[in-house]
Image: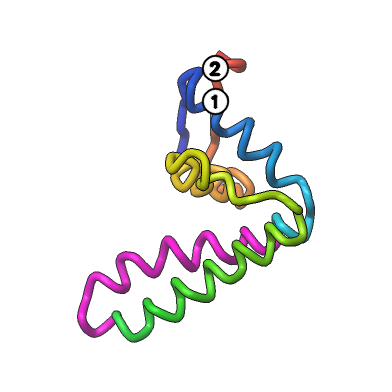
Amino acid sequence: MKITLNAEWTRLLQSYKADHQNPRNQFCHKIGIPLIAASLPVGATIIGLPLAVPMFTVGWGFQFAGHIFEGKKPAFVDDKRQLLVGLVWWGQKSGLVDVKTTAEN
């Protein structure tokens, strides 16, 4: 999948990357982000709700643990859009998303 970011979203992604340099934080985010993201559609069903709650909770646990290693607060504290940027970052790190930024256009 290919995503092209405009200048504003390019800056958000660059800021996110700058706040996620520690390899232990990146490792935690590589686990936490997909757990959180997957918990949302799973939890949208009554049957999946008992599974979604621990997925969501454990995912956020990994996120916050990563920021202890990084020594910085989570990016979404200052800008909620960083929650979406985190998904883009994870997709790019995982090789699932080809991100083209305005600097590359």
Viewer-side residue, 1 vs 58: 58
Label 1 sits on a secondary structure element that is helix
Asked if the stretch drawn in magenta spans residue 33, the answer is yes
User: In the displayed structure, does residue 45 sit left or right of residue 86?
Assistant: left
- Amino acid type indicated by mark 2: Thr
Reading the image, the residue beneath label 2 is 102
User: In the displayed structure, does residue 66 sit left or right of residue 79?
Assistant: right
Mark 1–mark 2 CB contact (< 8 Å):
yes
Quarter of the C terminus within the rendering? top right
Disc number for residue 50:
none
Q: Which residues are magenta?
A: 27-48
Cα–Cα span, label 1 and label 2: 6 Å
Reading the image, the residue beneath label 1 is 10
x, y percent for residue 17: 66, 39
Residue at left 45%, top 81%? 54
Viewer-side residue, 27 vs 74: 74
- Amino acid type indicated by mark 1: Thr
Quarter of the N terminus within the rendering? top left
x, y percent for residue 28: 66, 63
Give the mark nearer the N terminus: 1 vs 2.
1
x, y percent for residue 88: 51, 43
Picture colour scheme: rainbow
x, y percent for residue 92: 58, 43
Residue at left 34%, top 65%? 40
